[in-house]
Amino acid sequence: MKISEIYSKANKPVFSFEIFPPKTIEGDYKLINTVSELKKLSPSFISVTYGAGGSTKDKTIDLCESIQSQFQIPTMCHFTCVGASSIDVKATLKIIESKKIENVIALRGDPPKDQGVFIKHPMGFANGTELIEFIKRENFSFCLGGGCYPEKHPDSPTLDDDIRFLKKKVEAGAEFLITQLFFSNQLFQKFRDKIKLAGITVPIIPGIMPITSFSQIERFRGMANCQIPDDLVAELEALKDHPVEFLDKSIQFTVSQCKELLSMGVSGIHFYTLNQSRATIEIMKSLI
Ligand SMILES: Cc1cc2nc3c(=O)[nH]c(=O)nc-3n(C[C@H](O)[C@H](O)[C@H](O)COP(=O)(O)OP(=O)(O)OC[C@H]3O[C@@H](n4cnc5c(N)ncnc54)[C@H](O)[C@@H]3O)c2cc1C
């Protein structure tokens, strides 16, 4: 089923989950168990990430296919164009299409760590918008989503510039946008206000992730460019040597964050599960 249809027909919030392709066979087995647990929450769809630089291409596509066939859950395939020519992109999309995967989130991707800045392939694409334009031009019938950044994409000089480009992404064919993870609903609301002013009307879906260990805090701040409220950091720091209480506190924060987002009228929430079911199940139990 197409995600655009899921959002347009839903008469209640749409909950969906992101997983990533494991690197080990043990991880594969664990993931089957995680997906079985997550299925009990009746997710509207599950998305599978595309490893940096397309490193998990086959596994991402295979996982989407098997989740659809084994669990009857619609999937969304993440797809990036780092280091890929338009010929490579087209070939991969043909494979995705042949597996009856109807939804793709089309992303630029991050540059390799030693490269620093993103350099487009000479026969490829400079950003997510160019990728979406190409997918449409080639007449693929995927329902296309895109990424968005309530606290600004790190390469962008200002949030206003980023939103100007986001408008082009929607005009090119993105039917919904999923956010980078964030912890401040206030910043998300400011972003939504700007999006509205820019005339963007597609669903903007918060991407939410509970903090499951203290070391994640610095990583999120660096990688995802996101602010974490000082009082939450202080509370979690006090519990950093008590994993059970730490997770409980973090889940409590995420539940109130999600409840507030739902009261703000978001169309749904996409949970970054990190292939773990426990935190997501606990949070969802308080929401449904
Ligand atoms: C929901 C979500 C899922 C993700 N999943 C994955 C994944 O599975 N695998 C992975 O490797 N990465 C993933 N990422 C990370 C993503 O690939 C990176 O954040 C990447 O740096 C940006 O990709 P994008 O398509 O979102 O950004 P883009 O829309 O391409 O924007 C990137 C930068 O270019 C600028 N820009 C955009 N359009 C133009 C234009 N027309 N002219 C000039 N500048 C422009 C933007 O302002 C921004 O600064 C995900 C991100 C999100 C939000």
Image (spheres, rainbow, N blue to C red):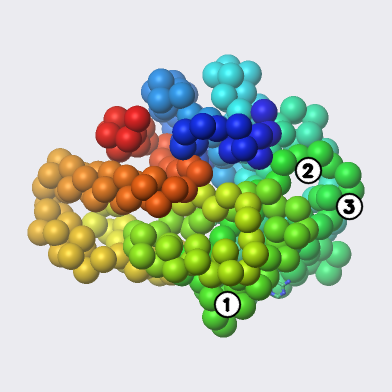
| Residue 122 spot, x, y in % from top left | 83, 69
Tell me if residue 278 comes above or below residue 185 in the rendering.
Answer: above
Q: Which residue is mark 1?
A: 160
Hey, which quadrant is residue 104 in on the image?
A: top right
Q: Along the line of sight, which residue is nearer the eye, 215 or 145?
A: 145
Which residue is denoted by mark 2 in the rendering?
92
Residue 11, percent from left and from top: 51, 32
Q: Is residue 272 visible?
A: no
Q: Residue at x 59, y 57 (%)?
A: 147
Task: Identify which residue, 203 or 141, lies in the foreground.
Answer: 203
Q: Which residue is mark 3?
A: 137
Please tell me in which quarter of the rendered image ligand 1 is found. Answer: bottom right
Considering only order in the chain, which callout, 1 or 2, is on the residue closer to the N terminus? 2
In the visual, does 225 lie left or right of 96?
left
User: Can you say which quadrant of the picture contains the C terminus?
Assistant: top left
Determine the image quadrant of residue 248: top left
Dot 1 alpha-carbon crowd within 10 angstroms: few under 14, some 14 to 19, many 20 or more: some
CA distance for labels 3 and 1: 28 Å
- Mark 3 vs mark 1, foreground winner is 1
- Measured as percent of width and height from the top left, residue 254 is found at 29, 48
Structural distance between the alpha carbons of marks 2 and 1 = 33 Å
**Badge 2 or badge 3: first in the primary sequence:** 2
**First along the sequence among labels 3 and 1:** 3
